[in-house]
Every structure is written in C-alpha cells, then in structure tokens.
C-alpha cells in the first residue's frame, strides 16, 4: 500500500481498516475479527457484486481478436483526475458507464448511536500480460503478440486483478467529522518462463502500475424520526499519472475499474431509495449519487446491506439459481451463450483459452456441463410481482375500436381445449394458433381513470415504487405520448410510450424502442386524443416492437 494518499480528517485509533489490496498476509487478531464480520455482512451479496465487477470483462466469443474485446472496461472506471479533466465532459449521473475521476454514494439508514458501519470498496486493477520471445543465445527478449510453444498458444492481453478494502468505523466517529482512508494498490512485476524440450524459449511478463485512490466517509443526522442518518461514501482516484496527453489505454493502467461499494455493519437498517418509507421521501430526493446508485441487497425483506453499483439495479438483485457460472454478460441469456460457446471451432476455442484464464474456465465449464444443468438453463417462470399483488383482480381488458371485449378469463378447461372448441366471444389461449388474432397495438385502447387511452394519447407517468424497473423512478411526473397498447401472454396490458422531453424520442420511435408502463402507472392528460391518420407512423416500427 502506497503511503501519502490519505487526506481529510484524522483517523481515530478505534477505526479498524482491513485491506485486501495485495497478496494475503498474516493479519492481527483485531483485523481478522473485522474481516470476518465484514465477510459475514457481505457474503449474501458476493455473487451479484462479482457479476457487476466482471460485467464486460471479456465477451463472447471470448477471443482477443473479437471486435467486442478491443475496447474494454466500460463501467465504474475511475481514472486520474488530471486525465479526466482533459478528456471527459463532466456530466454527473447515476450511471457509471463513462469514465470519471470519482464516484459518490449517498443513502439513508436508521440506527442506534452505538452502531458500527462497514464499507467495502471493490474494483479491478489493470494488469498487462505481455508475451516475450527469447532472442539469440543470450538473455535478450522481444515482445510479441503471439507465441506458439509446443502447440500451446500464448497471447499478449490485458488482464485485471480484483482488489478490495474493508473499512470499519463507529457511527459516533463519523458524526464527529468525515474520515478519509487510502484504498489504492501498489504496482507489481511478475514473470513466468515458457519452456520447451530445447529449454526456455519465451516468458510471460505481467506488469501492474500503482493505483492511488482514497475513500471519504461522512454521516449526518436527519430531521425526522430519532436515529435517522445520511451516509456519504466518495471514492476518488488521486493519482497524478499519466499526463493529460496520454491515450485512454495508458490512463486505464492507473485506474480503478468496475468500482463498486458494499455497505453494512452492526446496527444500521438501510432505506430503499427506490421505494422509500414516508418519512424518508424528502431526504431521498436530496441524496446525490454520482456514477453509482445504492440498492438494498440480500434477501427480499431485509435491510442490512446496500450495494452501490455503477450499473443501475433494482432492490435485492439476485443471480438466477439456474445460472451455473459467470459469462461476463449478465444481460445475456445463459442458454444462448452456452450453446454458442459450444459451437466455436477448435481454432476459436484455442484462441479463447490463450486469451485469458477466465475465458478458458468458461470453455471448460460449458464443455463439461451435465445435461441436467443444461436443461435447467432453458428458463423458469417467476413473477416479478410481490405475492400479495398476485391476488388482486385481473387488469382491465382492453377494448378494440370502441367495442368492449369479454372481461372474464377463460377457464382452465377451456384453455386446454382445442381452439376450434372455443365458444363465440371466448378468448383463444395465447399458445394456441390464432391466440393473437385481432390484437392491434396501434388501434386497441384500455380504460384508465374513466378514459379510453389509445395510441396518440398524452399521459403523465406515475410508476409504482414496488415492482417497477429501477430506472422508472427518473421518469416520475414526466409526460409521454402513447405509441401502442400491448398484450402480454399472462393477460396483462402495457402501454408503450415515448417520453416527450427525451431528445432521442423520435429516433427511438423510428427503431421501435419505447418505455412500457401498466395502465395503473399513468394518468391521462386533459385534451388527449388519438393520433390522426396523418400522424400515424409506419407499421414497420410496430412490427419491430411486437417481434
């Protein structure tokens, strides 16, 4: 750990700081106790945090030559400030998909005064893997992109090493003043020989540059119920290298990559910023989260841990139990990626294995996956709604061209009968041929607050805090234009809308990309009306959405 990167308030003697920024070393009894407590806090979050940490680390087809893998490190990248200010436009937001020199988390919690807060800052440190070939009979070395040693391929490539720092501090200390701690990592150089029958023919050199950074913690009491506080966690890259003229590739060698933060402790109960309790609503709006956003983590219904991620998540994110391992693309479908990976040619698999050890591990797992594990990748049906909502009455049935459709869902007996056996007026189940006949997103309507809302209507967005996408909270109160009324296979209805003040609305509509809301998440606006024939967009964009 490099010295001299700590700023701000002095560190009180009672603060315990546990670093895991380098090779494991013998720790004091106090450090081991702090690390054990932090591990217990964050164990339930580890799988999700790792998925975020390695999101986009190496994408299918997992080869260095793939265009996808030539521009890397897309989330939570904290570069030195001097480089950021020379190259990057300062546009603070909760998304960490652009480089910056800092990120900030603010969240709320309830606690007794004797609580102890634990913060774990996690990131990747870039590591350049260079393949070198021996030259002549001496000790000369030449860097090469590729080296074949007795049939084994070795490639020059950028890797990354996981780093984390655990901070543990009593709440009373933070209330007395902010505290700042170093969280950077030292540089390093490692070499490994590549030998054949004739001796050493090459070597692999792994080089890491120092990463200098700091995390500042601050807590403040809030107006409201006793024992309510706001916690601020700010992590900054404090390195002074490289020069402002350096390339992005050079700057990344001195950056924290995929930076994210876990929050827990003894005593605090955190509040959701997505669905806050009544007392916290005003304080939630005052929280300033920059290039990261905290959500409740762990099991549904718990509030002991927060996960602040550069990728926007909902409360209590989980890894699907059917997923057998990380594929570095949490937005993709395991089954598709696994099947495609199996279909790589032998030469493509050879290059993937030589690119990175994590790519080799993915290939090994997929090639050796038992059939029963493969079968469960096909998916499972889970409702995103809380259990109590599933007992509510079914949503209103849409109308077509002003004519009301039957509101009663078909019985289980009629659902299993052949489509030809359905009585007149009964809805054909969606899995039967003809189940979607007569549906028309551009002309169907649905009743909302006594108004038949259809394409062309203007609405105000009022997304529910519970069950909504995390990004929906940024659209509360915005106005939108309805682009179509869509029917899900479960019988529910969604309105596709374009947000009116979105500068990309016209382009998104051309592509058929819309936001979707349930009828109870919008309010019709006075004077709204359906689009005239002259205002109709081409049917092509509707077909895109339906597909």
Image (spheres, rainbow, N blue to C red):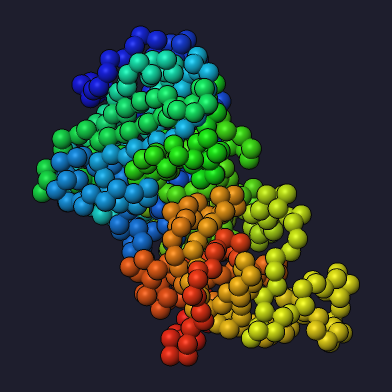
Above or below 434: residue 370: above
**Horizontal and vertical percent for residue 525?**
50, 69
Does residue 421 appear left or right of residue 518 in this picture? right
Q: Is residue 30 visible?
A: yes
Q: Is residue 23 visible?
A: no
* Residue 299 vs residue 466, the one in the foreground: 466
Above or below 275: residue 72: below
| The furthest residue to the front | 526
**Horizontal and vertical percent for residue 342?**
54, 62
- Tell how many labels: 0
- Residue positioned 50% across, 36% down in the render: 280
Does residue 296 appear left or right of residue 448 in this picture? left
| The furthest residue to the right | 413
Where's the C terminus, which quadrant?
bottom right
| The furthest residue to the bottom | 533
- Residue positioned 45% across, 49% down in the render: 312
* Residue 423 vs residue 132, the one in the foreground: 423
Does residue 51 appear left or right of residue 371 in this picture? left
Where's the N terminus, which quadrant?
top left
**Horizontal and vertical percent for residue 335?**
59, 61
Picture quadrant where residue 504 is located: bottom left
* Residue 435 vs residue 345, the one in the foreground: 435
- Residue positioned 70% across, 65% down in the render: 395
**Horizontal and vertical percent for residue 53?**
43, 43
- Residue positioned 76% across, 54% down in the render: 391
Picture quadrant where residue 18 is located: top left
Does residue 34 appear left or right of residue 277 in this picture? left
């Amino acid at each position: 750990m490099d010295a001299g990167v700590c700023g701000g308030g002095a560190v009180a003697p009672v603060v315990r700081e546990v670093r895991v920024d380098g090779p494991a070393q013998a720790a004091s009894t106090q450090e081991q106790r702090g690390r054990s407590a932090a591990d217990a806090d964050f164990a339930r979050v580890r799988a999700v945090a790792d998925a975020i940490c390695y999101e986009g680390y190496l994408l299918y087809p997992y080869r260095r030559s793939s265009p996808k893998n030539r521009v890397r490190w897309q989330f939570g990248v904290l570069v030195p400030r001097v480089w950021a200010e020379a190259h990057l436009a300062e546009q603070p937001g909760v998304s960490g998909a652009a480089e910056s020199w800092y990120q900030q988390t603010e969240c709320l919690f309830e606690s007794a005064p004797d609580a102890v807060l634990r913060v774990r800052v996690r990131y990747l440190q870039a590591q350049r893997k260079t393949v070198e070939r021996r030259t002549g009979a001496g000790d000369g070395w030449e860097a090469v992109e590729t080296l074949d040693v007795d049939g084994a391929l070795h490639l020059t490539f950028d890797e990354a090493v996981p780093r984390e720092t655990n901070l543990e501090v009593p709440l009373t200390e933070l209330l007395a003043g902010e505290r700042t701690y170093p969280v950077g990592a030292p540089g390093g150089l490692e070499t490994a020989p590549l030998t054949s029958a004739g001796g050493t023919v090459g070597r692999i050199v792994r080089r890491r540059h120092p990463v200098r950074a700091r995390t500042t913690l601050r807590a403040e009491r809030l107006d409201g119920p006793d024992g309510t506080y706001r916690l601020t966690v700010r992590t900054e890259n404090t390195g002074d290298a490289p020069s402002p003229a350096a390339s992005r590739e050079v700057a990344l060698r001195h950056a924290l990559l995929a930076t994210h933060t876990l929050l827990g402790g003894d005593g605090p109960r955190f509040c959701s910023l997505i669905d806050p309790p009544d007392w916290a609503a005003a304080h939630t709006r005052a929280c300033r989260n920059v290039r990261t956003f905290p959500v409740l983590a762990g099991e549904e219904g718990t509030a002991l841990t927060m996960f602040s991620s550069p990728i926007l998540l909902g409360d209590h994110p989980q890894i699907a139990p059917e997923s057998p391992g990380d594929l570095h693309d949490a937005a993709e479908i395991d089954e598709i990626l696994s099947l495609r990976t199996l279909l790589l040619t032998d030469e493509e698999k050879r290059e993937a294995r030589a690119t990175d050890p994590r790519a080799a591990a993915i290939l090994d797992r997929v090639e050796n996956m038992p059939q029963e594990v493969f079968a469960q990748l096909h998916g499972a049906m889970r409702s995103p709604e809380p259990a109590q909502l599933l007992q509510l009455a079914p949503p209103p049935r849409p109308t077509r061209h002003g004519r009301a459709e039957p509101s009663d869902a078909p019985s289980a007996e009629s659902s299993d009968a052949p489509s030809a056996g359905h009585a007149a007026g009964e809805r054909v189940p969606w899995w039967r041929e003809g189940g979607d006949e007569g549906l028309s997103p551009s002309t169907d309507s649905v009743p909302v607050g006594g108004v038949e809302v259809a394409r062309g209507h203007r609405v105000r967005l009022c997304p529910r805090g519970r069950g909504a996408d995390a990004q929906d909270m940024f659209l509360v109160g915005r106005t939108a234009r309805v682009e179509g009324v869509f029917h899900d296979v479960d019988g529910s209805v969604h309105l596709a809308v374009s947000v009116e003040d979105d500068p990309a609305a016209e382009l998104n509509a051309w592509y058929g990309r819309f936001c979707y809301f349930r009828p109870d998440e919008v309010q019709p606006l006075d004077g709204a009306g359906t689009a005239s024939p002259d205002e109709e967009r081409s049917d092509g964009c509707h077909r895109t959405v339906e597909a």
